[in-house]
Every structure is written in structure tokens, then in C-alpha cells.
Image (cartoon, rainbow, N blue to C red):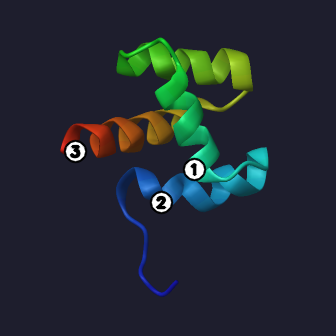
Amino acid sequence: MTDTLKGPASYFPSIEKKYGRPIAEWKELIRSSPLVKHMELVAWLKTEHGLGHGHANALVAHTLAEDNAK
């Protein structure tokens, strides 16, 4: 990949490396959660899955933006 990732997606390579799951799997977890508010989802990823705040926030922001664009 030659394009530089920007915004929340710039965190994706380090998220995959640190937590050992592909981004698609994280997005599916977020989408399958009964929670819908941004900060509730961030808190859930942090407490239930051990993500750091920045990584959780980036995943939630990107996933919700994708879903809202549909």
C-alpha cells in the first residue's frame, strides 16, 4: 500500500499488530454490540477487549462514519 492512511485509519496497522485481530473483525464486534453511542462503544472496547483509548476511539469513529455514509 503506497497511500498514507489519514484520520482514524492511520491507527489501523498498530491496532492489528498490538491486538492481533484484523480491523474487519473489530468493526464486526462494534456493529454487533447493542451499544450505539460513540463513547459507550469506546468504553466497552477498553473494558471488555483491553484496547487503549486512542485505538478504541479510532475504531469506533471509523466504523460509525462508514455506517453513516451508507
Label 2 sits on a secondary structure element that is helix
Disc 3 to disc 2, C-alpha distance: 22 Å
The answer to whether one can see residue 55 in this image is no
The amino acid on which the numbered mark 3 sits, given as a three-letter code, is Lys
In-front residue for pair 53/67: 67
Dividing the picture into quarters, in which one does residue 12 lie? bottom right
**Label 3 to label 1, Cα distance in Å?**
17 Å
Tell me which numbered mark, 3 or 1, is placed earlier along the sequence. 1
Identify residue type, mark 1.
Ala
Q: Quadrant of residue 38?
A: top left
The residue sitting at 52% across, 29% down in the picture is 30
In the shown orientation, is residue 61 left or right of residue 51?
A: left
Q: CA distance from mark 2 to mark 1?
A: 15 Å
Considering only order in the chain, which callout, 2 or 3, is on the residue closer to the N terminus?
2
Q: Earlier in the sequence, mark 2 or mark 1?
A: 2
Q: Secondary structure at mark 3?
A: loop
Sort mark 1 into few (<14), some (14-19) or many (20+) by Cα contacts within 10 Å: few
Residue type at mark 2 is Ser
Q: Please give the residue where the numbered disc 1 appears in the rendered image.
A: 24
The residue drawn where x is 73% and y is 26% is: 50
Q: Secondary structure at mark 1?
A: helix
Neighbourhood count class around disc 2 (C-alpha, 10 Å): few under 14, some 14–19, many 20 upward = few
Q: Which residue is mark 3?
A: 70
Left or right: residue 65 versus residue 46 is left
Q: Residue at x 64, y 22 (%)?
A: 46
- Name the disc covering residue 10, or none: 2
Disc 3: CA contacts within 10 A as few (<14), some (14-19) or many (>=20): few
Q: Give coordinates of residue 10: x percent, y percent.
A: 47, 60
Q: Tell me: residue 25, above or below residue 36.
A: below
Evaluate whether residue 61 shows in this view.
Answer: yes
Residue 2 % position (x, y): 47, 87
